[in-house]
Each structure stands twice: as structure tokens, then as C-alpha cells.
Amino acid sequence: MAANKSRGKQQRYLCRDCKKTFIKDLGFWKMKHTENIITMCVDMYLSNLSSRKMRNQLKRHFGLKLSHETILRWVRKYIQKVQSYVDKLKPKLSGKVYADETEVDCENRSDIFWCAVDWDTRFINATLYSPKAQNVPDAIEFMKRVLKSGRPKFVQTDGLQQYRKAMRKVFWSPYKGNEVKHIANNVRLTKKHNVRIETVFMKIKDRVLDFRGFKAVWSAPILMAGIVLQHNFIEKHSTTGKVPCELAGIDTLKEDNRWLKLIELSSQLNLCKL
């Protein structure tokens, strides 16, 4: 056993080939604090608690002295680690896609966040963060990301012209019956909002407001990816009563601490490559 002041005893293993000992890395190698403290910080931050408030809670309840910058580093580190794992997963989706874009405040500039949701599962299956205004190349790239999770039955968007061009570019087919239907909902004409994606955007916008906007363009896409991970793999949907990944056939996360399980799974994937 190897001892660590904060994390306690760590199991040490012996390699039969080289005879050296090692500690299995499950995502927290050489971290000074426990797995539960770290994952709680990631979970609470992405759930709506600022890094400064999280720092204060840790000081009051656990006597831990951490800076809010440390908590942010944990959040960004484990978002990227888990993202590399979930990118390899293949969710089972219904193909009923609702897509939209929204403005996100970053460095006092309005960036654009493109997002697509599979309606039956509520699984966010494609996103794109862009520091540019809505444009055709970004719309095409966004639709290509939608296509990566499988050819949808239909895609519903608002009346933005860039969607029409992107749909023709990405989903056009010369074969009858292989086309992807594009439902363009022009709110000015129908007086009906694309509520099935707006409910997701409400959650995203609320969290960005808690951030008081993003402070750096390099960090913003990472934190947005974390919000998507929180939606897809951590929190139960208020309507379905289930986490979207469960409805999408990804049911390997049985534990209450889902962030811990995701980090362990992503670490095991890296161990398999060695």
C-alpha cells in the first residue's frame, strides 16, 4: 500500500514482466484531494454553483482551503478527459432531430452555440461553438456533426436561411426515399416556437448567466461541452424522469456519482491503449 495524506492508502500493484510496482491510475493520479471532493466540485459547478461559492462551501463544511482557480482547473481537466471517452460511444437515437442556435456571451462578444437534440431520448447529439455570427460554413459543419450520430429521419430548425443551404449540402441524396426531411419552422409565420430545443437552451443560458459570460474564448467551448455532458450523462430529465444516456441505450452508469464513473471509464480506456 502507498499512503497519501489527503486520499489515504492507495493499492500498489506489481508488474510480473518488469518487476516494478505501480498504482493504477483511475483518473486521479497524484491529485491531492479525494475523488469524491473533486467530482463533487465538477458536478456542482456544472449544476449551477460558481467556483467561488464552491470554494466557500468546501471551507465551511470540510475545512479545505482551495482557490476557485483550482476548482476551475479540475472542471476543465475532467470535462476534456470524459469528452474523449464519450466521443467513442454510440447512442441509440430516434432520428427525430431538433436543431437551433443561440448567442453566448464571451469576452463581451456574442458567440454562437449550435445544438441538436434527439427528441425521443433528449440526448444532445451534436454541438458547435463558434466565435462568428451565423454563417453557411458553420451551419454545414454543424449538420455534418449531426450526421455523425446516424442519418436522421427529419431535422427541424427555425427559418434561418443557412440551415436550408446546409441541409442540401449535407443530406441531399439522388435516391428517392433516402432524403432527410427538413422542417423549417418560421416563428414569424407559425407563431410557434421550436419549444423542444428551447427547453434545452433555457438550461444552457441559465448556466452561462451564472458564469456571467465566458471570460476566454479558449475556455468557453470546454465549459459548454461540460454543460452538454451534464445534460446527457448526469442529470435526469424533468419530463422523462431518466438521464438521456439511459434512453439512448448507454446504461453503464449505475452509480449515484456519475462523474466518478465516467472518469474511471475514460481512464480505463487509456489503460487499454498502453
Image (cartoon, rainbow, N blue to C red):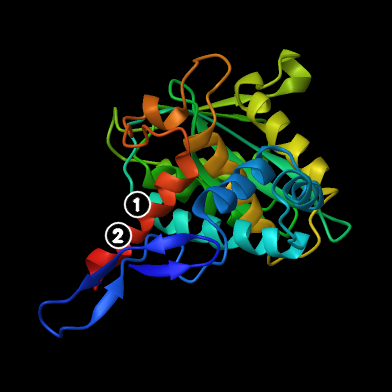
Q: What residue is rendered at 66% in x and 20% in y?
A: 195
Image position of 133 (left or right of 38):
right
Q: Reply above or below: 222 against 101.
A: below
Residue 194, given in percent of the width and then of the height, sits at 65, 22
Farthest residue, direction right: 108
Check the image and report above or below for 83 versus 252: below
Between residue 268 and residue 127, name the one nearer to us.
Answer: 268
Residue 269: image tag: 2
- Give me the residue at 68% from left, 53% from top: 135
Please report the residue visible at 48 percent of the width from the left and 68 percent of the height from the top: 4
- Residue with the most extreme left position: 17
**Residue contact between numbered discs 2 and 1, judged by CB atoms under 8 Å:** yes
In-image side of 237 versus 180 (left or right): right
Numbered circles on residues, count: 2
- Residue 94 visible in the shown view: no
Q: Position of residue 148 (x, y in %)?
A: 38, 47
* Residue drawn at x 57%, y 60% as measured from the top left: 33
Specify few, some or many for label 2: CA neighbours under 10 Å numbering under 14, 14-19, or 20 or more.
Answer: some
Disc 1: CA contacts within 10 A as few (<14), some (14-19) or many (>=20): some
Along the line of sight, the residue nearer the viewer: 265 or 117 = 265
Q: In this rendering, would 89 be left or right of 129? A: left
> Which residue type carries mark 1?
Leu
* Residue that numbered label 1 is attached to: 265
SS type, badge 2: helix
